[in-house]
Amino acid sequence: MTDAMIDKARGNIEKSGFKNIRVTKGEATLIPLDDGSVDVVTSNGVLNLVPDKEKAFAEIFRVLRPGGRLQLADIVTRENVQAACGIVPQLWADCIGGASVEKDYLDMIRKAGFRDVKVIDRIDYFAQSPETTRRLTKTFGAESVVISARKRASASAD
Ligand SMILES: C[S@@+](CC[C@H](N)C(=O)[O-])C[C@H]1O[C@@H](n2cnc3c(N)ncnc32)[C@H](O)[C@@H]1O
């Protein structure tokens, strides 16, 4: 993210009058928060852009408190885009170049330690995209999914 985005977010918070919001700049793969310090992590359209998703999910798991929840929306695919196309910056900018195959994506979340990993909604994110993008996203079966998961409350609880 850019500093201009951070400034805009801080400006909007100021205008909103809310006093319980803080903006902290950080990397998804190195979250500048303490272990177990977060109740809920939400994310929208970010992780498809992160090359090391396993590290990002490990970081999300680390900062969540026991019993904490993850809810995110992201682009996933049916076919492996990178295996077919390699690393293509334009495809990354279109949010499909770095997207994972759905099963691999869900497996990464489980491998990070999350329980009850569920796809709770599917959205045709590319419905309004130009025809060329639509054709490409259809070829790879790209769509947006909403996923929920939780961190176990304690070592003995399930
Ligand atoms: C498509 S935008 C989505 C923005 C916002 N969540 C929304 O719904 O409008 C992708 C965002 O991911 C952020 N991003 C990409 N790679 C990141 C990383 N490694 N760590 C943290 N944020 C990252 C970008 O800065 C950008 O703000």
Image (spheres, rainbow, N blue to C red):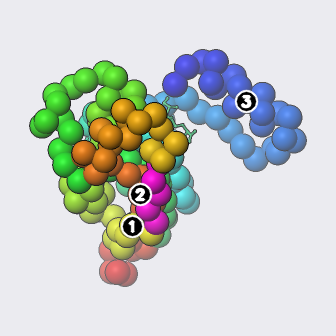
Q: How dense is the environment of label 1, judged by Cα within 10 Å: few (below 14), some, or many (20 and up)? A: some
* Coordinates of residue 93 in the picture (x, y in percent): 39, 27
Q: How dense is the environment of label 3, judged by Cα within 10 Å: few (below 14), some, or many (20 and up)? A: some
Whether residue 60 is situated above or below residue 2 in the rendered picture: below
Asked if the beta carbon under badge 2 is closer than 8 A to the nearest atom of ligand 1, the reply is no
Which of pointers 2 and 3 lies earlier in the amino acid sequence?
3
Which of pointers 1 and 2 lies earlier in the amino acid sequence?
1
* Coordinates of residue 39 in the picture (x, y in percent): 55, 60
Q: Farthest residue in the front direction?
A: 131
Circles 3 and 1, Cβ within 8 Å, touching? The answer is no
Asked if residue 136 can be seen in this view, the reply is yes
Q: Residue at x 43, y 73 (%)?
A: 153
8 displayed left or right of 61:
right
**The disc labelled 1 sits on which kind of residue?**
Val
Gap between marks 1 and 2, in whole Å? 7 Å
Question: Where is mark 2, residue-wise?
Answer: 145
Out of 88 and 135, give the one closest to the viewer: 135
Q: Which labelled disc corresponds to residue 10?
A: 3
Magenta-colored span: 121-125
The C terminus - image quarter: bottom left
**The disc labelled 3 sits on which kind of residue?**
Arg
Badge 3 element: helix
Q: Main secondary structure of the magenta part?
A: strand
